[in-house]
Image (cartoon, grey):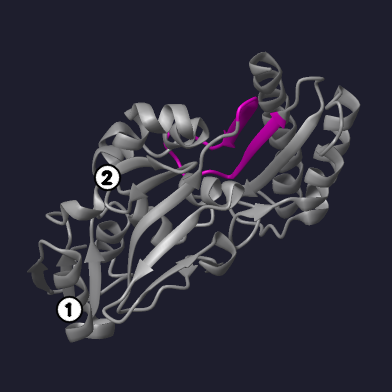
Amino acid sequence: MKPAAFKYVRVDSVEAALSALEQYGSDAKILAGGQSLVPMMNFRIAQPSVLVDINPVNEIDFIRAENGWLCIGARTRQTTLEKNPDVNQKCPLLAAAVKWIGHPQIRNRGTLGGSLVHGDPTAELALVATLLDARLVIRSTAKSRTVGPADFFDGFMSTRITETEILTEVRYPAAPPGSGYGFHELCIRQGDFAVVAAAVQFTADDVGLCTEARVAVSGAGPKPLRIPAAEKILAGSDASAAVLDAAAACVPAELQPMSDLKGSEAYRREMARIFVRRALADAWSMAREKR
């Protein structure tokens, strides 16, 4: 199939984009990388009357480190996240997770903001934002607001951004000294959407105890989920094999998976436990090496 007819509006600034959204309202959609929107239009799942093309808007294509945060413009390409030295140094989990997104051709066009606003519950970038409690900067013509993942991801393919707003920036806390990460994803074929994925970040002190643990899972509910029960077990522990086993064992009860053609509810719960356990091992091994 081909998309329904639409009007094409190309803008070169955030202000012009916001003005177009104010003018066309719910009839308009933002076009950045188009890696999610265009296929949906081709199948006529989405039928916007107006496409507002923000590809010329260079002001939201940036990466900079500021006061313990890594600030990234929403139009930044995913391949840039994968290769940028600041991302690899300040937020290496983000760089590692991006490698799991589709294929190089997808990452060459796909953008950070486009993936997050799309709200796919299996998206790698949504999982990392949830794990790290990223700050998302959203602008309208009237104001700018900053929210966390809990106030941004609303449910399956749903985010709390209005039709006259644009996500302009995402801020990630820089990885603390002595931290390690783990990221594991189960998919049927390389480049497919994840069945489940697990992300972990550990911080170890000088005597080998865990000072902070973050654990999150995607693909097992309507949006990525932090696992506070696992984090509580890990914090202050020596992260022994028994402790990691106990943290992973509490994961299935925290999830809200659905059965589909890729796997049953029970399968997703068990795979989430296994993949969290693998991510925990990787993260703790890395954290110990950095002590």
Local secondary structure at mark 1:
helix
Instruction: Please state if 128 lies on the left or on the right of 107 as rendered.
Output: right
Taking the image as shown, residue 243 lies to the left or right of residue 260, namely right
Q: Dot 2, crowdedness within 10 Å: few (<14), some or many (≥20)?
A: some
Q: In this view of the protein, which residue sits in the foreground, 241 or 34?
A: 241
Q: Quadrant of residue 169?
A: bottom left
Residue 262 visible in the snapshot = no
The three-letter amino acid code for the residue at tag 2 is Phe
Query: Which residue is at 27% across, 52% downward?
Result: 75
Dot placed on the residue nearer the N-terminal end, 2 or 1: 1
Q: Which residue is mark 2?
A: 62
Report the front residue among 268 and 61.
Answer: 61
Q: Is residue 194 magenta?
A: yes
Q: Residue at x 69, y 33 (%)?
A: 202
Q: Secondary structure at mark 2?
A: loop
Can you say whether 112 is above or below 200 in the image?
below
Image-quadrant location for residue 63: top left
* Residue under label 1: 19
Residue 239 visible, this orientation? yes
- The residue carrying pointer 1 sits among few (fewer than 14), some (14 to 19) or many (20 or more) residues within 10 Å by Cα, namely some
Quadrant into which the N terminus falls: bottom left
Label 2 or label 1, whichever lies nearer to me, is 2
The residues colored magenta run 177-203
Q: Amino acid at mark 1?
A: Ser
**Residue placed furthest toward the top:** 289
- Is 1 or 40 nearer to us in this picture? 40
**How many numbered discs sit on the rendered protein?**
2
Q: Position of residue 147 (x, y in %)?
A: 50, 66
Determine whether 20 is above or below 288 in the image: below
Where is residue 44 drawn, in percent x and y? 28, 70
| Of 9 and 39, the residue lying toward us | 9
